[in-house]
Image: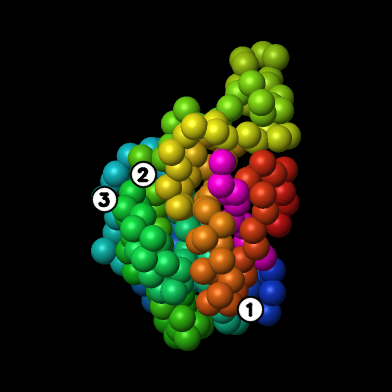
Amino acid sequence: MEKKFAIFKKEGIFCPNLLEGIMHTEFFEKNPFEPRDSDDGEWRTSKNIITELPKEIWFVSKDKRYDFDFRWEDGGFFVSLDFLNLLKKFEIRNFQYTKIYMVNKHKESISSKEYYFVRFYNKLEDVIDMEKSNIEFYKQNGHIRKIWDLQLKSKAILPEVFQINNIRLFRVMFCSEEFKNEVEKLKLKGITFVPSNEADMYKP
């Protein structure tokens, strides 16, 4: 099987691991960091379904500036236009996206990059080789506790970019070596790649 990689965030200049802010479906001038009922929705869950996305999202941040190209945040990924265009170039079709504005409390942009909220659906089922993988289960209910060594089925047909419908991996985007090479060629920021078998072990 062709090498597969797990995509993770990487800390760097204006690429913090933790984004300090709040996500809204509109900008609120009064108390912009206060949670609102309209912030919630099915689109912020990890359900493996197509759902309706907000027309736009506002991420009001306490950080001074952003320059990353990839982050996981609240049910989906924050990606730059460059990263989004790569998904389209590789003809990945099982995701939804909507514009996200990165601003401070005064509604001023804190990045020169254009960002989008990306949410996958039709995540892959039955692609983990349970016999070859090293998986620890909870004794009480049989649920997966930890995947020490993730092995994908050798005969599984895997897209260039994909997610796996598994609670331990819901924040992980996987990709082919070709996609990885394209990301590195573009010198996208705040991204690192680890072998797919380490997907549940790696800590950014």
Q: Name the disc covering residue 52, or none.
A: 3
Residue at 29% of width from left, 59% of height from top? Answer: 54
Q: Position of residue 126 (x, y in %)?
A: 47, 28
Its colouring scheme is rainbow
Q: Nearer the viewer, residue 173 or 18?
A: 173
Residue 16: image quadrant is: bottom right
| Nearer the camera: disc 2 or disc 1 | 2
Above/below status of 38 relative to 80: above
Residue at 42% of width from left, 67% of height from top? Answer: 86
Q: Name the disc covering residue 14, or none.
A: 1
Judge the density around disc 1: few (<14), some (14-19), many (≥20) Cα neighbours within 10 Å: some
Q: Could you tell me the amino acid type at mark 3?
A: Glu
Query: Which residues lie in the magenta part?
Result: 1-10
Q: Position of residue 152 (x, y in %)?
A: 57, 35
Q: Nearer the viewer, residue 177 or 142?
A: 177
Q: Could you tell me the amino acid type at mark 2?
A: Tyr
Magenta span: predominant SS is strand
Residue at 56% of width from left, 62% of height from top? Answer: 180
Q: Is residue 57 in sight in this rendering?
A: no
Q: Label 2 belongs to which residue?
A: 121
Element class at badge 1: loop
Q: Position of residue 128 (x, y in %)?
A: 55, 30
Above/below status of 57 relative to 93: below
Element class at badge 2: loop
Q: Which of pointers 2 and 3 lies earlier in the amino acid sequence?
A: 3
Q: Which of pointers 2 and 1 lies earlier in the amino acid sequence?
A: 1
Judge the density around disc 3: few (<14), some (14-19), many (≥20) Cα neighbours within 10 Å: few
